[in-house]
Image (cartoon, helix red, strand yellow):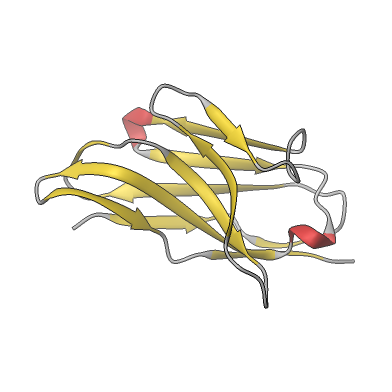
Amino acid sequence: QVQLVESGGGLVQPGGSLRLSCVASGRIFTIGAMGWYRQAPGKQRELVATVTSGGSTNYADSVKGRFTISRDNAKNTVYLQMNSLKPEDTAVYYCYAEHVLGVAGTGDFWGQGTQVTVSS
């Protein structure tokens, strides 16, 4: 069974930085795009950033220039470096992996989420 496990969330002051990590575990052969979404209280889940297996990236306008997504295909891991954090970045951040090909077939998977709180 494929699982995504996030780490790196926490409490940080405005202007600070955090680095999120997400590892996909299980018998995995290939993974398509990976990405990060977030959901703030009372709001819908929204895209933060995605990265393809070839390294092409896409960002929400609200995080461009502040966040950087990257991945290590050999480790089935995706990262999100978040700099110049703002209170409005406070949310639960979810890792996502699509077209994951494993021994049981192909599917899309979500992590359990990690809380990021930006507050003084």
Please provide percent x and percent y for residue 33.
40, 37
Residue 116 visible at all: no
- Name above or below for residue 80 compared with residue 95: above
The quarter of the picture where residue 54 lies is: top left
Left or right: 24 in relation to 79: left
Where is residue 119 drawn, in percent x and y?
A: 84, 66
- Give the mark count: 0
Residue located 33% across and 55% down the image? 109
Quadrant (top left, top right, bottom left, bottom right) of the N terminus: bottom left
Q: Is residue 26 left or right of residue 94?
A: left
Q: Quadrant of residue 77?
A: top left
Q: Position of residue 111 (x, y in %)?
A: 41, 60
Observer-nearest residue: 20 or 94?
94
Quarter of image, res 46? bottom right
Q: Position of residue 78 (x, y in %)?
A: 47, 40
Instruction: Work out which residue is located at the far bottom of the displayed protein and give it.
Output: 42
Which residue appears at 47% of the width and 53% of the height? Answer: 95
Q: Residue at x 47, y 56 (%)?
A: 6
Instruction: Determine if residue 18 is in view.
Output: yes
Relative to 39, say whether 29 is above or below. above
Q: Specify the quadrant that holds the C terminus.
A: bottom right
